[in-house]
Structure formats: C-alpha cells, structure tokens
Image (tube, grey):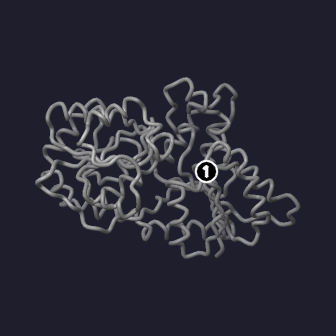
Amino acid sequence: MKVLFIETFYGGSHRSFADGVVRHSRHQVDLVTLPDRNWRQRIRTGAFEIARRVPDPREYDVVLVTDLINLGDLRALWSVGAVTPGPPVLLYIHETQITYPPPRTPRQRSEVETAEQMQDIKNCLLAERVLFNSRSHREAFLAAIDSGSGHPLPAHTGLPWVEAAQAIRERSGVVYPGVELVTRRPIHRANRPVRILWNHRRAYDKRPRRFFRALQDLAAEGVRFEVVVLGESPRGESTDGDSPAVLQAREALGDRVLHWGFAASRGEYEEWLSSSDIVVSTAIQENFGIAVVEAVAAGCVPLLPLRLSYPELIPETLHPTLLYGDERRFRDRLRETILTLPEIRKRCQEEGLSAHMHRFSWQRTMPCLDRELASCCLPGSI
C-alpha cells in the first residue's frame, strides 16, 4: 500500500514522528515536508505549497497528514480538474489550539487567533479518520467542543458544537506516537548528589519558573542535588528567549547546573538521560510526553502532575508515589523524592516501570498505525 505522508512542520517531535513512520511502517511511505518555522503561516498557506509539489495524489492509497494545515484548502486544490475522488485522509493530531492554555500576557494572548483554533475542528470534520496522540488529548478536545465553552469557541453564534463533537468522536481514535527508547544501561552512582533532569522546552506552557523556583528553595535549604537542563528556550536552541527569572535561577544554582541547552548529539542526550536520577515536569500542557517516556525508559524516577497525559504513561499502582495533585506542594514532593530516592527507585523496579515504557516503542505503536492506514482504504470505511 502506498501512503503519502504530509508534514508541514518538519521539526522537533513532528520530525521524530514522521521519520519514525517512514522507518518502521510496513507500507511504502513517501514523506513530503515543509520547514519547521512560522506554524501559523503553515496553517494558512501550507496546503498551496503541498499541492504544488504533489498536484495529483491519486497514485496513493491513503494520505496521512498532521494538524498544522488547512485540510479544506488542500482537498479543494486537489479536486480542481480531477475526474475521480482523491484518496482518503487520515489526520494525526499532535496538538490542538483549542486545548492549548492561553498565554498570560496581553501580547501573547493577542497572537492566539480564533480562526486557527477553529481550523482544528474543520480539519477533523474533513478527514475520513482522526487519530489523537493520547486519550486525555482526545477527551479534552471533544469536551471543549461539546460544551461550546472552549476558550476560542464563539458560543453566541449558535453553531452546532454538540453535533460536531459527536461526528468527530465517531471518526476518531487514539494511537500513541512511537518513541525511540534508550537502550544503554542506567548509571546511578551513590557517591554523587541526586541528578535532576529537565528535558522539555523552557516555554510558558511547561512552567519552567515553578521548577527553577523549587530548585532555588531546596538549594537554600542545603539539599544536595545536581540539575541537567536539556531542550530549547522559547526562541529556539539559544538561551536568548529564557525569561529573566529562569536566567537568574541558572546563575543562582551555579555549579549545580551540569548542562544547559541542547545536547550535541543523540548519543550525548541518551548519556544525560541514563545518568540522571529524577525527571520532572511542571507542565500545564502536555498531549503525550515523549521526553518523559524517554527518561523513564532510561531509568529515571518521574515526578509528574496528576493530570494531562501523565496518568496514561504511569501504571496506576505508582500514581500516589510518582504523580502530584497539588501544585503548591511540588517543592515538598521534589524534596521528598530526592531524600527517599533509593526507596522510590526500588518500588519502581518492583513494578517494572522502565519496562512499562516499551508499550510506547515504535515496535508496539507502528502496527496500530499501519492497521489504521489500511482500514481507511477498506470498502465502506469512508
């Protein structure tokens, strides 16, 4: 079966997912991409660029496309001059603007446009099949539409939100994105301070200030720890986009900071993961959590919010130990995790936490996506 995979934002987790599909699918997958810049522009004009590069998709059995596109424009452009219908479309959703937490500052809020958030709904209604990257993401998206109270939805217009939500629910499902799991053995040395890992973007939706404020407080108490900060600032790979509070925390933590910013290679990234002890999240937005899965598979003990996608990642028996419900107690839970790490690690080993992450490996998730792609082509599936 021939699959046309369209990725209009070929970078970060989108790129990892696209490359993984090409590498692991049993189908023939032709990948067409656009660079990962100006995501709003990709939604508005990406369809025109794709249609120019692939003017006739009918040689393919199915089209796999991710969310940063105007699917209506793409299907309209492909229909011009076409005698027969084009192939069915499977829409894979990494993120949705409706479920994205609105920024705090007026300048940032002004950048959030209803048209782009509404595009999520229209794309879902135009695709034959829709897949979300977690159950929590799918349910949050549908709940926002169903209630008509999602922050971008113009409830006063009387649009049929309940009907739209039901239509999307009937054609949607969940397939977790595959993860390239770390295969090297964990390196935990008892004679060094506990090593805390932050391997997320340092953007507002990940709440880095809460994390670094807790570290500063624990350092002032004399708690022994080191910290490894991987990933990008809000403006990319440099530290130019870090907030003054985050930069001040970096300076205050001093020699406790072993690394800051992107790892130079995948190998170096895996070394930091396998040598770290605790991976932390303070996010208010996370649709799956590839970074957490990678770290836990490498042997890190997680400390995560009891919300978003995180309860799906962690076995329920470990929720009381590894997930925190009260954000105000994050610092206390982090201190407790540092001071009782041997006991918590033993519990995680007894529950097989690292092995539990293998259900998110490409070897486990790609067959599910392959079956979804094949089902789109079955008679009566459209």
Above or below — where is 37 with respect to 64? Answer: above
Q: Where residue 294 appears, x then y in whole percent? A: 36, 58
Q: Where residue 81 appears, x then y in whole percent? A: 88, 61
Q: Is residue 170 left or right of residue 57?
A: left
The one nearer the camera, 327 or 242, is 242
Which image quadrant: the C terminus?
A: bottom right
The one nearer the camera, 101 or 250, is 250
Label 1 neighbourhood size at 10 Å, few (<14), some (14-19), many (20+)?
Answer: many
**Helix, strand, or loop for circle 1?**
loop
Above or below — where is 153 with respect to 354? Answer: above
Q: Residue at x 49, y 41 (%)?
A: 140
Q: Residue at x 49, y 68 (%)?
A: 366
Name the residue beneath numbered marker 1. 67
Q: Amino acid at mark 1?
A: Asp
Quarter-of-image position of residue 298:
bottom left
Above or below — where is 41 with respect to 80? Answer: above
Q: Where residue 273 appears, x then y in whole percent? A: 30, 57
Quarter-of-image position of residue 82:
bottom right
Q: Residue at x 29, y 68 (%)?
A: 184
Which image quadrant: the N terminus?
A: bottom right
Q: Where residue 319 appears, x then y in whole percent? A: 27, 47
Q: Is residue 191 left or right of residue 64?
A: left
The one nearer the camera, 21 or 58, is 21
